Image (cartoon, helix red, strand yellow):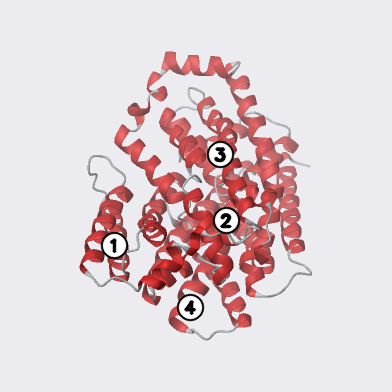
Amino acid sequence: MSSTIVVLLIVLAYLVLVMFMGIRAGLNKDKSVEEFVTAGRSLNVFTMYFLMGGAIFSAFAFLGGPGWAYSKGAASFYILGYCAMGLVPWLLWGPKAYRLGRRYNYMTQAELVSDRFQSKSLSAIMAIISILAFIQYIALQLKGMAYVLNVTTDGLIPFWLGALLAYGVVLVYVFSSGVRGVAWTNVLQGLFMLFMAWILGLWLPFKFHGGISNMFSKIAENDPSHLIIGAKMSWPAFSSALIVSILGFTMWPHLFMKSFTTKSEKTLKRTVALYPTFAIFMIPVLFIGFSGIGIVPKGTLESADQILPYMLTQLNLPSVILGLVAAATLAAAMSSSDTITHGAASVYTFDFHKKVINPNMDDKKSLLVTRIAIVIFCSVAYYIAVFGAKSLVALLLGAYGSIVQFFPLMVAVFFWPRATKQGAIFGLLTGVLINFYITITGISIYDIHSGIWGLLGNIIVLVIVSLLTKPQDKSHVDKFIEESQIPVD
């Protein structure tokens, strides 16, 4: 049996295992839409840790992260920064959102925000922005999975088919089991990919350079610019990418929604406390990229994102090992794509369809619409993954620029009673349009991320318009300012 066939069989076996576990997680569970979206608000610390961790260990981690370390060197350390700090803002409003979610049965981020500002229009706008960003993020995962299958099978699995296989598996278990299937498959995939990350991150530097210390010594001697942040990426670009990523991390609706799935407030706080340990697991991932510097000549790869699968195919590894590495990389991508796909469909159903198209939709129809949305959004993301040309990191940072515009809204919901509906809507639109304009035109303003300029315009407009418009009813606002401070456990 050829090496390529062995690799393919291992990958297919892994995909079947993940699909089985995802479907099994949803069997004999309540068929309500609340179970599908929030798992009955019952997830414990163990499942929450891996559910949230899957947001970091994505195709971006196993492919985009090493790709940046290989091409941009020390600039890739921004990944460690936002992995360690990304969940810290959740400590400010995560418990508050949890308390209000328990009291008023919120399932999505926009349900909470639109209720605070008494605006269906704001809910619809947030849904549209979220879905557009989600599709970029899902495409990132599919693109990464297609890379792996294509390279590790020596082209036997074409790019379009690799993306289609991964898309199909994720679609089946998310469609079947909702967030509970997502959570338990993430536990399996999280343990597997963390194990493989450390093996690769330690072994590749020893294989090519004789050790981690020798690897960095060689880089310092031959191309020291890889060890200076400002050399491959300017300090304004590095700092603004870090800020956008930290502030935008918990603004992703699929992550914010986990405030409503957790078993208790204590569980949520423990998840925040444990979460930075995922930054430790990112260190070996970056070692993978650094180990390719000086080994893989410049211009060899179509994209730096392909550095890991390329190096592995040049090592004449036993086919079983290569198959396990390919499966681990798939695990990283799938553990994010399932969470994002579920989040996108939930956002569409509750924040757009029920607010704009059919406000009286019952539980059964809500579940049906959510499942149909899963299929549609995955299909659009698949098209972008196959025919789009952007790198994984570019896709990710582009999506963050829009999502970070929700940050001022969350501050206003819980900490600024004077904020009004008009201020929230116009501020959000201003921030998104600024980010979109700068991204599309490709202009660079002091090399600062477009999301930061959008955020600045967003805050200014939110404050000015809110002060110029009529305040909301005090008793209504107190529901969010004061009740959010009262524990429910």
Q: Amino acid at mark 2?
A: Ser
Determine crowd level at label 4: few under 14, some 14-19, many 20+ residues with C-alpha closer than 10 A: some
Q: Nearer the viewer, residue 97 or 180?
A: 97
Residue 116 to residue 444: above or below: below
Rendering coords of residue 224 (x, y %): 40, 19
Q: Which residue is mark 1?
A: 427
Determine crowd level at label 1: few under 14, some 14-19, many 20+ residues with C-alpha closer than 10 A: many
Is residue 24 something that shows in the picture? yes
| 4 or 3: tag closer to the N-terminus | 3
Do the residues bearing badges 1 and 3 touch, measured as CB atoms within 8 Å? Answer: no
| 1 or 4: tag closer to the N-terminus | 4
| 2 or 3: tag closer to the N-terminus | 3
Can you tell which of label 1 and label 4 is closer to the viewer? 1
Label 4: which secondary element: helix
Q: Amino acid at mark 1?
A: Gly
Do the residues bearing badges 1 and 4 touch, measured as CB atoms within 8 Å? Answer: no
Q: Which residue is mark 4?
A: 353
Q: Which residue is mark 3?
A: 276
Rendering coords of residue 135 (x, y %): 47, 61
| CA–CA distance in space, label 2 to label 1 | 30 Å
| 4 or 2: tag closer to the N-terminus | 2
Is residue 341 something that shows in the picture? no
Can you tell which of label 4 and label 3 is closer to the viewer? 3
Query: Residue at position x 54%, y 14% from top?
Result: 214
| CA–CA distance in space, label 2 to label 3 | 21 Å
Do the residues bearing badges 4 and 3 touch, measured as CB atoms within 8 Å? Answer: no
Label 2: which secondary element: helix
| Left or right for 456, reference 272 | left
Label 3: which secondary element: loop
Determine crowd level at label 2: few under 14, some 14-19, many 20+ residues with C-alpha closer than 10 A: many
Rendering coords of residue 29 (x, y %): 75, 69
